[in-house]
Image (cartoon, rainbow, N blue to C red):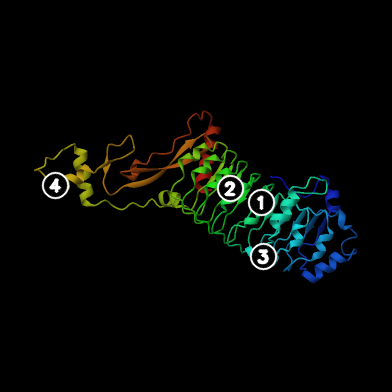
Amino acid sequence: MEVYTSDSSDTDSREQKTLDFGRMSLDLVTLEDHLASPQKALLKASGDIETMLLNHNRLVGLPRLLLQFANLKVLDLSSNAITTLPDAVCQLPLVTLIAKNNLLTNASLPKSLLSKLANNNNTTNGGGSTLKELNLSGNQLTHFPEQVTELRHLKYLYLGANKITSISKDIWKMQSLHVLSLGGNLISEVPEAVGSLNQLQALVLCDNLIENLPTSIARLKTLKSLLLHKNRLRHLPKDIVALKNLTELSLRDNPLVVRFVQEMALKPPTLLELAGRTVKASGQRPGPYDIPRTLAEYLNNANCCVNPNCKGVFFDNRVEHIKFVDFCGKYRVPLLQYLCSSKCIEPEQPARGSAAPAASASSGFMMRKVLLG
C-alpha cells in the first residue's frame, strides 16, 4: 500500500519537511503558540512544510494558522478530542488526512469538503494536490458521510469503529478506491453499488450486522482481501467463486461458521425417526393396510443423505454441515449440506492436483485462513 508522506525518498529531506508536534499534550492555545513562534517551529519556513503531526494531544479544534502551511500534504490529527473539522482544512492541498479517534460527528464535518477538496482534485497546476487517503475511524459518525463520495481520486477510505448504519448508494462514484474499511459499525445491508468499485483491492466489513451480501460482490475482479468476520452471515452468494484474485477471506464468528463448525452438537433422534430409518434401511415397503396412513406419509418424506458412500436417510433430525470446497487452489468456498449422521462428515482431502507436499501445506494454510480469518 502506498504511503503518502513526501515526494522525496530521502530521509533527511522528509525530516526537513515535517513538523512533529505529536504526543506533546498540546491544547489549542499552546499549539497556536508553537505555530506562531519560529523558534518553537525549529525555524522551518511554513511554505516548506509538507507533513504535520498533531496526534495524541489534547486538541478540541484547529487553529486558522494552519492556512499558512500552503504546501501541506499530510495532516495527522489522530487521538485528540476534536469535535469539528474547520473549513480551513479543506483549503489545504492535502494528500492524506488522518483524523481517527476523535469526537467527530456527521454534523462536524465541513460541508465544503465536497466543493473545496473536489476542486483541489481538479487542479492541474504544480501547486495542486489530490486527497488520496482519508481516515475518520474511531469517531461518532452515525451515517456514511456523503461528502466523501465526491472525492473521485480517493484511494483509501477508513470509516471503521463508528456507528454507521448504512453505506451510501452513491459509493459507485468513488472509482479510484483501493481500500474501503467499514469494520466495527452497525451496517446491516451492503448496497449493490459496492460491486461497481472496479479498482477495489480490500473490503473490510467485519464486526457489523450483515446477514447477506449482494451478488454484485462478484464483479470486484481486483479484490484481494474480503473481511467478513463477526457478522450474521448464514451463507455466501455462489457467484463469489468469480473472485479469482481473492487471497484472504475471513468468515469467523458468523452463524455460517459458528453454528456448523464450532457447535457440532446433535440432538438425539426421536423413536419415530429411528423406526422410520430402520424401515427404509431394510428396504421394506409397507402396504396401505399395513400401517396407518400418517406413518406411510411420514416414510414417504424421507431425505437421502448427501454422502455418496451412505445409503441412509433422515426425516426431522439431520446434521447441518458446512463443507469447504476447493476453489482455484487458493481457498475454500463454504457450501451447506445435510447429512443423516455426524459420521457421514467426510474427512478433508488434499487439494486436487497438489502433487508436492509443499502444495498441500499451502492449501491447508489457506483453508485455515478462511475458517479462522
Is residue 350 left or right of 81 when viewed as pictured? left
* N-terminal-most mark, 3 or 2: 3
Circle 3: element type: helix
Which amino acid, by three-letter code, is at mark 4?
A: Arg
* N-terminal-most mark, 1 or 4: 1
The alpha-carbon separation of the residues under discs 3 and 1 comes to: 18 Å
* N-terminal-most mark, 3 or 1: 3
* N-terminal-most mark, 4 or 3: 3
Q: Which mark is residue 355?
A: none
The alpha-carbon separation of the residues under discs 1 and 4 comes to: 67 Å
- Give the residue number, with chain letter if any, for mark 1: 150
- Give the residue number, with chain letter if any, for mark 3: 108
Q: Nearer the viewer, residue 234 or 265?
A: 234
Report the residue at 64% width, 65% height from top. Answer: 107
Q: Which mark is residue 203?
A: 2
The alpha-carbon separation of the residues under discs 1 and 2 comes to: 19 Å
The alpha-carbon separation of the residues under discs 4 and 3 comes to: 70 Å
Would residue 325 be seen by someone viewing this image from the given angle?
A: yes
Circle 2: element type: strand
Q: Which mark is residue 293?
A: 4
Mark 4 is surrounded, within 10 Å at the Cα level, by few (under 14), some (14 to 19) or many (20 or more) other residues, namely few
Is the residue under label 2 in contact with that under label 4 (CB below 8 Å)? no
Circle 4: element type: helix
Q: Position of residue 373 (x, y in %)?
A: 54, 48
Report the residue at 32% width, 44% height from top. Answer: 341
* N-terminal-most mark, 1 or 2: 1
Which amino acid, by three-letter code, is at mark 2?
A: Leu
Which amino acid, by three-letter code, is at mark 1?
A: Glu
Q: Nearer the viewer, residue 142 or 358?
A: 142
**Nearer the viewer's eye, disc 4 or disc 3?**
3
